Image (cartoon, grey):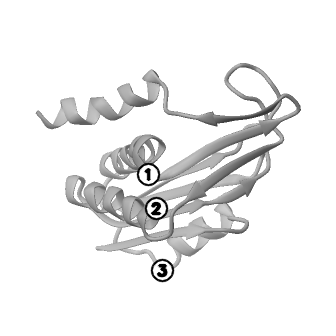
Amino acid sequence: MALDVRLIAGPLSAPAELEAFLAGRTDEGAVVSFTGLARGVARDGSAVDTLRLDWYPGLTEGSMYDIAAAAAARFPVRDLVVAHRCGNIAPGETIVFVAAAAAHRRAAFEAADYLMDRLKTEAAFWKRETGPAGSCWIEPVDEDRAAVARWNDEAS
């Protein structure tokens, strides 16, 4: 089992990440990946020029690793990768890339879904959108919390 968890301060290429993750795979029957992109429109419909993801060295990486380790313990996956940007991100740029490799598709899909639900709400990032009207902090919304809560419900 390999966990590849990285915090990246520069550009993140999802195609390159996927190509590297797929290289040499012969034992897994399923690879599922997810790429998250920065939006150019805020929840309220206003324009976003920049998304800023602030982080605290060590704490942020640790929170990402803990989430990946929990996914690895919960699902029968062989490998996981979590690559997450930090710093300033322009609309259309990749924020996050996750991939899961497993013998069968269900485990790979569930692991990737679980990773994203928890990263979005629990990873130690402070998110701020800036646009023509100024800047505002972004917090998880009820929909995000419900997505994470369903994993707790399924464990019972």
Please report the residue visible at 73 percent of the width from the left and 38 percent of the height from the top: 39
Residue receiving disc 2: 60
Count neighbours of disc 3 (C-alpha within 10 A) and say few if under 14, some if 14 to 19, many if 20 or more.
Answer: few
Q: Please, what is the three-letter code of the amino acid marked with disc 2?
A: Thr
Residue receiving disc 1: 123
Percent position of residue 135, x then y: 75, 36
- The image shows a total of numbered marks equal to 3
Marks 1 and 2, how far apart at CA: 7 Å
Q: Quadrant of residue 65?
A: bottom left
Where's the N terminus, which quadrant?
Answer: bottom left
Q: Disc 3 or 1, which lies upstream in sequence?
A: 3
Please report the residue visible at 48 percent of the width from the left and 43 percent of the height from the top: 120
Q: Disc 1 or 2, which lies upstream in sequence?
A: 2
Label 2 SS: helix
Marks 3 and 2, how far apart at CA: 30 Å
Percent position of residue 50, x then y: 78, 45
Marks 3 and 1, how far apart at CA: 30 Å
Label 3 SS: loop
In this rendering, position of residue 90 left or right of residue 4:
right
Q: Nearer the viewer, mark 3 or mark 1?
A: 1
Residue receiving disc 3: 24
Please report the residue visible at 11 percent of the width from the left and 33 percent of the height from the top: 156
**Front in this rendered view, residue 4 or 89:** 89
**Front in this rendered view, residue 127 or 106:** 127
User: CB under 8 Å between callouts 1 and 2?
Assistant: yes
Count neighbours of disc 2 (C-alpha within 10 A) and say few if under 14, some if 14 to 19, many if 20 or more.
Answer: some
Q: Please, what is the three-letter code of the amino acid marked with disc 1?
A: Ala
Q: Please, what is the three-letter code of the amino acid marked with disc 3?
A: Gly
Label 1 SS: loop
Q: Disc 3 or 2, which lies upstream in sequence?
A: 3
**Front in this rendered view, residue 10 or 94:** 10
